[in-house]
Amino acid sequence: EFDYSGSQAIKALKEENIQTVLINPNIATVQTSKGMADKVYFLPLFPEYVEQVIRVERPDGILLTFGGQTALNCGIKLSKAGIFAKYGVQILGTPIEAIIDTEDRKVFRERISAIGEKVAPSMAVYSVTEALEAANILGYPVMARAAFSLGGLGSGFANNKEELRCLAAQALAHSSQLIIDKSLKGWKEVEYEVVRDAYDNCITVCNMENVDPLGIHTGESIVVAPSQTLSNKEYNMLRTTAIKVIRHFGIVGECNIQYAVSPFSEEYYIIEVNARLSRSSALASKATGYPLAYVAAKLGLGIPLPTLKNSVTGVTTACFEPSLDYCVVKIPRWDLSKFSRVSTKIGSSMKSV
């Protein structure tokens, strides 16, 4: 999925006659092929390596949102270390503050509350003892998950103290911050893909619903686009909220927002906002025919949404929302032959390929 978004972004930049430098440790990708980027560095996405490339190449700008969670984490570290300021590199698209606000769960909760929206009751903790205290306040069962992690690494459900103690110790090995959430098992999981330009033009491109309920990682779930069980009122309520949230954070480009929706009422919580191209973005692009990564790269350059042409239709501009004339189902694939003795239960951390 990230290869797809990266190669689309490179094409968009080349159209604008911009020289591109790509850092990607994976040789077996489309974006590292001949004729794509002008220069390719096969280096791991660690701040020290990226700094060396910046020092040699002296780029004017950098796009962080096309390399998944790894690129975002690396970008945050570089920004905090003052590397971008030191070499005069501008972050294109979504400002780094917005990325940090959406990634740090404590800040995220405060920012969402400021506009009168709700996130699932949760607490950010930094030790096993704090995790147990938080669970007592929220009430069991709870979900524990590591912040700044990819594929739900180090997450799971705990029904009692013993389970939580074990989970928290594992998760804190991956991350300094751990989130304890009130369990919303059995609620519907709905996602929206939203696009916004630097001039505050905003559209929702696609919405999706997970067949599996909340508690199963999105990457493990069967996903249907468009959503099948939302009423018109619910659909528009969540759409309005998605646009309100993306404007509040000041995201420029593409963004994915995930909701927990009660199956019995119109109650909902915002689970998370990904200020980057995610797994769902690739599915949304294929389902709707709207080239999300291509458009997001152009928006990162400060091009207004109404002036962009939809490269798929060739007729409409990019500020037209795609019509709902499709039904797409994504089914994950697991490589069970290589790992014969692992648990085949699906859950909150991702095992599918």
Image (cartoon, grey):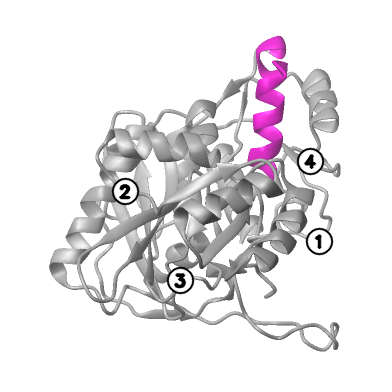
**Disc 1 residue crowd, few under 14, some 14–19, many 20+, Cα 10 Å:** few
Q: Mark 1: which amino acid?
A: Ala
- Which one is earlier in the sequence, the residue at label 3 or at label 2? 2
Q: Is residue 329 above or below residue 66?
A: below
Could you say which quadrant of the image residue 169 lies in? bottom right
Q: CA distance from mark 2 to mark 1?
A: 42 Å
The residue beneath circle 2 is 118
Return the residue at label 1. Answer: 28
Whether the residues at callouts 4 and 2 have beta carbons within 8 Å, the answer is no
Who comes first in sequence, dot 4 or dot 1?
A: 1
| Residue 32 or residue 247, whichever sits in front | 247
What is the CA distance from the residue labelled 3 to the residue labelled 4? 31 Å
- Identified by mark 3, the residue type is Leu
- Residue 45's disc is 4
Inspect the image, locate mark 4, and give the three-letter code of the amino acid beneath it: Leu
Sequence order check, earlier mark of 1 and 3: 1
Give the left or right position of residue 278, taking residue 7 as reference: left
Q: Which residues are magenta?
A: 70-87
User: Residue sitting at 80 percent across and 24 percent down?
Assistant: 51
Mark 3 near mark 2, Cβ–Cβ under 8 Å? no
Label 2 crowding class (10 Å Cα cut-off): few <14, some 14-19, many 20+?
some
**Residue at the (26%, 41%) spot, across then down:** 244
Q: Position of residue 327 (x, y in %)?
A: 35, 80
Q: CA distance from mark 3 to mark 2?
A: 16 Å
Question: Marks 4 and 2, how far apart in space?
Answer: 34 Å
